[in-house]
Image (spheres, rainbow, N blue to C red):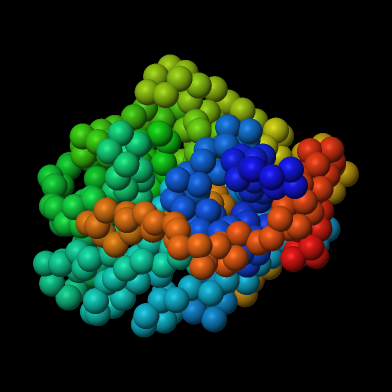
Amino acid sequence: MTGNQLPEDIIVSDILVKLPIKSLIRCTCVSKRWRFIISDPQFANSHFQQARHHNALTRRLLLYSSPSQVESVDLETTPSSSSPIRNLTCNLNKQPESIKLLGSCNGLVCLCTDPTLSTCDVFIWNPSTGFFRNLPYPCFPSATHTVLFGGFGYLSDTDDYKVVVAVHNVFDYGENVEEVKVLSWRTGVWRSIEVHSLLSYTLYPAAVVVGETLHWFRNDRWLGSAIVAFDLDKEEFREMRPPPNLGQRYDRDYVHCVASLGGRLHVFRYPAGVCDVMELWVMEEYGDGESWTEVFKLKFTDEPRKSVYLRPFLAVGGSSVVAKVTRNSTMEMVRIEPEDDQPVVDMLKRGVEPAMIVYEESLHRLPGCGVEEVKVEEISNPRFSTLLWVTDHWYALLALVASMYLEFNQHEQLLQITVNIC
C-alpha cells in the first residue's frame, strides 16, 4: 500500500458499513468497485446486523393506496422534519388495485395480489432498494381461492426464507381456511401442511415475526381469543396465552393486534368503535404466559367516537404512532404524546385506507427462488484497474473524508463531501 492509499477494509468497516441506506445507494454511483462492495449480500447482512446491534435500524411504514400511490413514512421522524414521506415505485406486473401485505422480515416485504376470480400472485419486495422478485405460483385448488392471511420469516441456521399462506374460497361466506401452504426459498417449492383446527378467518392478514416464529391474534366467536404462532423450523401451529386481563374468551367489545417491538412480542388493545383508550402489553419472557406486563395506557382526547378502529404501528417510551380510520373510510396517521400539551399530532391524511405494514430499511435481496446466490468474481485484468479503483490521488482525498468522519461522525456530511470529491 502506498502512503496515500486507504485500505479497503477501512473503507468498508469504518465508513460504508456505518452509513444509512439512502447514503449507501448514492454511494453505488461513486465507482464500480464501491457498487460491487455495496451489492455484495455479505455486506448487506453485515450492515443490517450492525445497525440492529446499535439499535440504529430505521423503521418505516409502507402504504399502498393504488398502483400510482405507494409511499413510506419514517415512523420515528416528527412531522416537522423535512420530507418524512417518500414516494415509491412498486413494479407489479398487472398493477392490481388491491393487494395484501403478508409480512416483512430483514427489510423485505412479502405481498400478494388480492383478486376476485383471477390469479393470485405472490412477490418479495425491498422498498428501500427497489429489489423485486416473483415467487412461484402457489397452485390453489381453483380460481375462486385466494389468500386469507399469511406470513414471511427467516431461518438463520439454514439461511432460508419461508412464506406461509392460508387459502380460502371467496364464495365461502364462512371464510373457513381450506388449505395452508409453505414455500421454502431454498427449494422453491410450495408444500401443503395440515390445516390446524385453531386457525380462523379473524387472523389479521400480515403475521408479526419474533425470532423465527410468526404470530397472529385470533378473536373468534367459536374458538375464543388467543395468539396463534407458527414455528418456521418445525412448520407447526400452536396457541399462546394472551395478556391475563384480556381473557381467552371471544371479546366483541375490544380489538387486539400483535406487534414486534425491540425483538419482543407485544399486544395492543383498544375498545371497538369508540377507540378512546389504547393499552400496550409486552411478553417479558417469550413463551411464558405469566410474564405479560402492561407497558402503558394511552387516552385520546380528539373526539374519539369519530374513529372506527385503530392500527398501532410503533410504541417508544410513552408515545405511539397509530393509524386512525374514521367511519367514512378516511385515514389519519397520528403520533400520541401523552405528556405534550397537544397529545395528538396529525402526520398523514388519506381519503381511503391503504394497505399498510412496517418494515426496516436494509440492502437485502434474494436470488432466484430455489437458486443459490452466486458471488460475482472481481475483475482482475489490469486493464480494468482504473474502472475498479480510482487514482492514488483519490485515496488521499478519501483518507481526508475518513478522518472527518471519525472526528465528527456525521454520516450525511461525509457522503456530501465524498460526492463532491468525485
Seen as rendered, the residue at the extreme top is 290
Q: Residue at x 42, y 36 (%)?
A: 210
291 in relation to 228, above or below: above
Total labels: the figure holds: 0
Residue 263 in percent (x, y) is at: 50, 33
Residue 265 in percent (x, y) is at: 47, 33
Observer able to see residue 310: no
Q: Residue at x 40, y 34 (%)?
A: 211
Residue 140 in percent (x, y) is at: 16, 66
Observer able to see residue 31: yes
408 in relation to 354, above or below: above
Would residue 342 appear left or right of 301 to someone viewing this image? right
The quadrant of the image that shows the N terminus is: top right
**Relative to the observer, which residue lies in front, 190 or 399?**
399
Residue 114 in percent (x, y) is at: 34, 71
Q: Residue at x 32, y 42 (%)?
A: 159
Q: Residue at x 21, y 39 (%)?
A: 235
The quadrant of the image that shows the C terminus is: bottom right
**Relative to the observer, which residue lies in front, 199 or 314?**
314
Would residue 130 appear left or right of 191 to someone viewing this image? right
**Relative to the observer, which residue lies in front, 127 or 229?**
127
